[in-house]
Every structure is written in structure tokens, then in C-alpha cells.
Image (cartoon, rainbow, N blue to C red):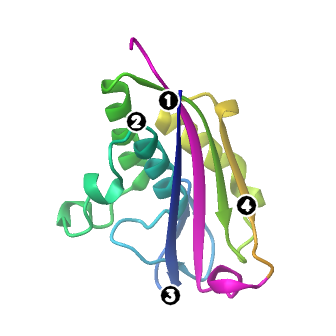
Amino acid sequence: MRIGHGYDVHKLVEDRKLILGGVEIPYEKGLLGHSDADVLTHALMDALLGAAALGDIGKLFPDNDPSYSGADSIELLKKVCALLREKGYTICNADCTVIAQKPKLSPYIVRMRERLARAMGADLEDVSVKATTEEKMGFTGEGRGISAHAVVLIEKQNR
């Protein structure tokens, strides 16, 4: 059994879509980044890669590679999970937390879990997504960005 932790953060800006967990969320701002800047999915990918000691998303999908400009992070997550399976790992579960003062994310949590679980080839009950604020403190609390943490458990098959 191996545990991985992932973290990501992106700045909120005008004229960008807000995508979290593969779900577009209506909001006046979106996250700035080379890809779709889906902090939740990025944190999850880093947790999976870290658990398997396979680096991070910057190594696998560098932001100076134009082929990843505007990339759909759910598609990248599918590639990460395929790599883990190729290396003999099974994903046991994932527990993710999004930190955002606004918008209110609770109406979108189930859809996020569904999108992530489907991309990972996991059961819905094995993928947790939670959202919290930081009580108006720090850059997320001030509405300047959104961050996410993810913790995963994977298991090596046929050791």
C-alpha cells in the first residue's frame, strides 16, 4: 500500500472558465493556467503520481509544451491512471478538498466525484470531494485564488 499527497493552487482571473473536478462552474472568474487550470484534478494527479513515485504533472505534462495549452485535465487524469495501471498499481481511494471562499461548491460536488471516478476507473464511493473556505483569510479567503489538496491510497499488484 502506498499513500500520496497532492496540492495545487491557481489564481482567479477574469475571462476564464472555472473548471473543478472536470465540472464547469458558473462564476464571474476562472483559474489562470496553461491547461484548463483545474486545481482539484491537478492535486489528484500529483497525489497519484507521488504515491507511485512517478514524479508530478509538471514532469509528465510540462507547461512549456504547447500541446498541453488549454488541455482538459480530466483527459490528463486518464493518462495518469493508465500509467499507474501499466506500472502495476490499483487505486484504492482518493480524498480531495477544494479551498475556495467563492463560489459555493456544494451543488457541484456529486458531479465532480462522478467525473473524477469515471476518469480514474474507480467506484464513486472510492472518490471523496469536499469543499471549504478559509474564513476570508489568506489568498483563497480573499478570493484571489483557489487551492486543492488530495490524498490517495494505491496498492501495488504482483510484487
Query: Could you tell me residue 108's position as x and y percent?
Result: 70, 56
| Residue 109 vertical position relative to residue 128 in the rendered view, above or below | below
Query: Could you tell me residue 60's position as x and y percent?
Result: 27, 51
Distance Cα–Cα, label 4 vs label 2:
24 Å
Of residues 72 and 59, the one drawn nearer to the viewer in this rendering: 59
Look at discs 2 and 3 and give the one toward the viewer: 2
Indicate which disc, 4 or 3, sits on the residue closer to the N terminus.
Answer: 3
Distance Cα–Cα, label 4 vs label 3:
22 Å
Q: Residue under circle 1?
A: 121
Q: Does the magenta segment cover residue 65?
A: no
Q: Which mark is residue 81?
A: 2
The amino acid type, in three-letter code, at marker 1 is Gly
Query: Disc 4 on helix, strand or loop?
Result: strand
The amino acid type, in three-letter code, at marker 3 is Glu
Query: Disc 2 on helix, strand or loop?
Result: helix
Of residues 159 and 49, the one drawn nearer to the viewer in this rendering: 159
Look at discs 4 and 3 and give the one toward the viewer: 4
- Describe residue 32's horizontal placement relative to residue 98 as left or right: left
Residue 28, image quadrant: bottom right
Query: Could you tell me residue 105's position as x and y percent?
Result: 72, 63
Tell me if mark 4 has few (under 14), some (14-19) or many (20+) residues whose alpha carbon lies within 10 angstroms of its own: some
Distance Cα–Cα, label 4 vs label 1:
23 Å
Q: Are marks 4 and 2 in contact (CB under 8 Å)?
A: no
Q: Residue under circle 3?
A: 14
- Describe residue 43's horizontal placement relative to residue 129 as left or right: left
Indicate which disc, 3 or 1, sits on the residue closer to the N terminus.
Answer: 3
- Magenta-tinted stretch: 136-159
Tell me if mark 2 has few (under 14), some (14-19) or many (20+) residues whose alpha carbon lies within 10 angstroms of its own: many
| Residue 67 vertical position relative to residue 157 in the rendered view, above or below | below
Q: Residue under circle 4?
A: 131
